[in-house]
Amino acid sequence: QVQLVESGGGLVQAGGSLRLSCTKSGRTFSDYAMGWFRQAPGKEREFVATVNWNNRRAYYADSVKGRFTISRDNAKNTDYLQMDNLKPEDTAVYYCAARDSTVTSTLTSWYHYWGQGTQVTVSS
C-alpha cells in the first residue's frame, strides 16, 4: 500500500524557518515526480513546488520563489521542503504528492498519491 507521510510542521514566527519531510513507502518512487501543495482555510489547494524524478528540475510558485527549496533523497525515499523567511500568508496545511511520471506538474489533478498533510502556522 502506497503511503506518503508528512512531518515537520508547526508554529513559527514570521521570518523563521521550517523543514518539512515527506516519507514515502509501498513502492519505489525514484521515477516519480513529486510536489508540495498547501491549503489555507477557506481556500483551494494550491501548488507550492515540484521536482522531477532525478532532482534536477524544480519549479516554484511565485509566492514562495527564493524562500522555499524542494529536494528529494531517492535513497531514503524522502522528500523535503525547506521553508525560509516564512510569512503569515504561508499559514496552511501542507501536502506532499507523488505523480506517476518523471515529468513535473503544477496541477493537483495530475498527482496520484497524497499525504495526510501537516499544519504550518506562521505568527506575525
Image (cartoon, rainbow, N blue to C red):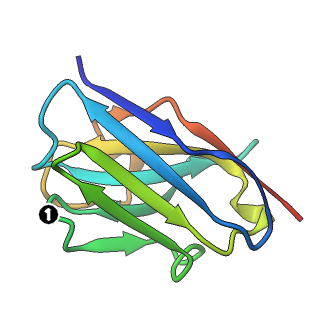
Residue type for callout 1: Asn
Identify whether 84 is placed above or below 107. Answer: below
Outermost residue, bottom side: 66
Rendering quarter of residue 2: top left
For label 1, count other residues whose C-alpha is less than 10 Å away and answer few (under 14), some (14-19) or many (20+): some
Q: Which quadrant of the figure contains the N terminus?
A: top left
Q: Return the x and y of residue 50 as percentages of the image width and height.
A: 35, 62
Q: Secondary structure at mark 1?
A: loop
Question: Which residue is found at the position 42% from the left and 63% from the top?
Answer: 49
Identify whether 51 is placed above or below 108. Answer: below
Relative placement, left or right, of 76 versus 122 is left
Question: Which residue is found at the position 57% from the left and 50% from the top?
Answer: 38
Relative placement, left or right, of 98 versus 39 is left
Q: Return the x and y of residue 46 as percentages of the image width and height.
A: 54, 54
Query: Foreground residue, 55 or 89?
Result: 55
* Residue on which the image places disc 1: 54
Rendering quarter of residue 76: top left
Q: Return the x and y of residue 112 as percentages of the image width and height.
A: 28, 36
Question: Which residue is found at the position 12% from the left and 36% from the top?
Answer: 28
Q: Which quadrant of the figure contains the C terminus?
A: bottom right
